[in-house]
Amino acid sequence: MKQLIVFIQKEFLHVFRDRKTLLMLFGLPIAQIVLFGFALSNEIKNSKIVVVDYSKDPVTTQLIQEITSSQYFNVTRGLPSATGIDAAFKRGDIKMAVIFPEHFSDDLIRTGKATIQVIADASDPNQATTVTNYLTQIVGTYNARLAQASGQPLQIGVQNRMLYNPELRGAPNFVPGVMALVLMLVCTMMTSVAIVREKELGTMEILLVSPFKTIYIIISKLAPNLLISIVNLCVILVLSDVFLDLPVKGSILLLFFDSILFILTSLSIGLLLSINAKTQQAAMMSSLMGMMLPTMLLTGFLFPIENMPLPLQWLSNAVPSRWYFIVVKRVMLKGLGFSSVWKETLILAGMSFFLFAVSIRRFKTRLQ
């Protein structure tokens, strides 16, 4: 037993001396609990909406106050008419619009019925359904209180209209997220082993003493992966059109241009990981874990970004998949043009140039 206790003590010492092991044992569970229990939530809060009130009577004023005071909605502004709603949806400024028709209070008192029109962005069907259900619940609660106070049966109905995805299919939200995830993982994982493989095989010396310039070596590593990724992009778009009935509504050239920028950004990330890694296994694990989780959690694909704490919202700006996800949804689903995605395009171009420049800078022409 003394020998066993000595060996157990030795193993405890090994564990507590290894910082990486301690980080895996204690840091990872704590991070997961904090992220999934506090930061990441499927609950929709502070959704940006606009209100168009043609009636401007006491009933609509009180109902707007009920909506504004709710934690689920953030009424950005009131529009004088419904003409600016479509532009606000295209810019991505709002998730929902609420329209009160003329003589709303008079119709409610005279006939006992009145209807509110609700327009939601259904490119994310789950979010659209959730926010309309929240609004219906608020209207129902107010309706019951108003009917009790007036002493007569009153009914405020909600007429829903879903933009961009009237059938509320899951594919319009699923496909852009999968495109971002697949291209990011495939590009980074393929490229992350490009340089370190040469080091492990012992062929890096041959490349370094060859007359090729450093930039030629890097470009030769990226070119095949770039072509393979473009083929993957074409396959995804064809499958989406044929099997999911999800064609590209906007410019196919614009979508390809931004996709190539995103692919170059992903390839540059993989190249940077490959340059800094010591083994192929370490490079693969870094690309898989380092890119998959941010792409799934911080792009708005699974969890709404506006619900996250501010530090995570700021961190999501550094994830290229977030900007590509926005581009795909606006071009592929909403049919918008370059004027609606120019900011995201410039961000992807800047990320691609910066990461590629850092990779060239970090590439060592001498082996250690």
Image (tube, rainbow, N blue to C red):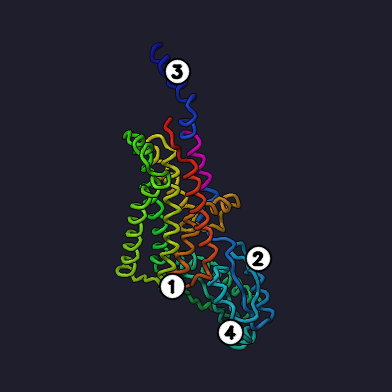
> Along the horizontal axis of the image, is 324 left or right of 235?
right
Residue that badge 3 annotates: 9
Residue 69 numbered tag: 2
> Along the horizontal axis of the image, is 298 left or right of 59?
left
Q: Is residue 137 visible?
A: no
Residue that badge 4 annotates: 112
Q: CA distance from mark 3 to mark 1?
A: 65 Å
Can you say which quadrant of the picture contains the C terminus? top left
Residue that badge 1 annotates: 250
Q: Is residue 106 above or below residue 346?
A: below
Task: Inspect the image, locate mark 1, and give the three-letter code of the amino acid beneath it.
Answer: Gly
Chain-order first, disc 2 or disc 4: 2
Can you say which quadrant of the picture contains the N terminus? top left
Residue 150 numbered tag: none
Residue furthest to the right = 58
Q: CA distance from mark 1 to mark 4?
A: 44 Å
| Label 4 residue SS | loop
Q: Is residue 222 above or below residue 255?
A: above
Task: Inspect the image, locate mark 3, and give the three-letter code of the amino acid beneath it.
Answer: Gln
> Along the horizontal axis of the image, is 183 left or right of 88?
left
| Label 1 residue SS | loop
Give x and y (percent) for residue 105: 64, 83
Chain-order first, disc 3 or disc 4: 3
Q: CA distance from mark 2 to mark 3?
A: 59 Å
The residue nearer to you, when weighing 36 against 205, is 205
Task: Inspect the image, locate mark 2, and give the three-letter code of the amino acid beneath it.
Answer: Ser
What's the magenta region?
25-36
| Label 3 residue SS | helix
Give x and y (percent) for residue 79: 64, 77
